[in-house]
Image (cartoon, rainbow, N blue to C red):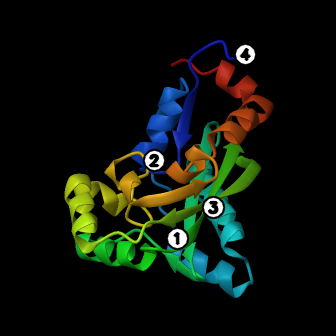
Amino acid sequence: MWKTRPVLILASQSQTRRNLLASAGFAVVCEAAGIDERTLEDRFRREGAPPAEIARRLATAKAEAVAARHPGAVIIGADQVLVVEHEVLHKPRDLAAARAQLDRLRGRAHALHAGVALAVAGRSVWDHVETAELVMHTFSDAERDAILAAEGQSVLGCVGSYRLEGPSVRLFESVRGDYFTILGLPLLPLLHALRRFATDEMESIEP
C-alpha cells in the first residue's frame, strides 16, 4: 500500500482524466505533452498501425515527452481514437463541427479505443489499450441541438463531441465496454500497473 497520497503527472489537460485519478485518491498535476499528435498519427497509420495501436502509441509518446522533462517523476499518458465506419474522428474545433460529428454518429455504431501508458524514472515501463463499442440512437435534429445546448463548450474537448458522463448519454442506444475507458482512461489496468511499477517512487513523494 502507498504510505502517502501519491502525486502523479498526467500528460494531458483533460479535466475528466484528472477527476478520475483524483477520485481514486491521487494528487494529480497536469502538463500538456506538447507533441504533434496528428503528425504522429499519420506516421503510425502509414506504418500500418490499426486504430487501437495508434491510441496506445500516442499515449506512450505523451508519457515519454513529459518524462523527458521530469525524469524523476511518475507520468501517465493517455489518448483516445474514435472510429466510425473506418473513419477516424478527432475533437471538434467548434460547435458547428460538433454538430456535424454527432450527425455522422447518429444511428451508427462506433469504436472508442483508449490507450494509456506509464513512464517511471524517465523511461516507459508499461502501456495498454482497451476498446468500447457504442451505438447512438437515430435522434432528431432537435434532440441533437438540445444536447449541444446543455453540454455547451465542454464537448469541444471530447472526441466524438459527446460526454457519456453528461447529458449526451441520452443520445445512446447501447454501450458495451468499460465506463472508464469511454471516459478516456482505462483506470483499473492503470491502477494495477501503478502498484506493480511505481509503488516505491510514489511512497517517497510527499503530497
Q: Are marks 1 and 4 in contact (CB under 8 Å)?
A: no
Q: Are marks 1 and 3 in contact (CB under 8 Å)?
A: no
Q: Is residue 83 left or right of residue 53?
A: left
| Label 4 neighbour load within 10 Å: few <14, some 14-19, many 20+ | few
Who comes first in sequence, dot 3 or dot 2? 2
| Amino acid on which the number 1 mark rests in the picture | Glu
| Residue 36 in picture, x, y percent from top left | 50, 71
Residue 53, by quadrant, is bottom right
Q: Which residue, given by chain and number where applicable, does mark 3 sit on?
A: 61
Q: Secondary structure at mark 1?
A: helix
Whole-angstrom CA distance, mark 4 to mark 3, is 29 Å
Tag of residue 37: 1
| Label 2 neighbour load within 10 Å: few <14, some 14-19, many 20+ | some
Would you say residue 34 is visible in this rendering? Answer: yes
Q: Secondary structure at mark 2?
A: loop
Q: Is residue 36 left or right of residue 47?
A: left
| Label 1 neighbour load within 10 Å: few <14, some 14-19, many 20+ | some
Tag of residue 31: 2
Tag of residue 1: 4
117 vs 149, nearest the viewer: 149
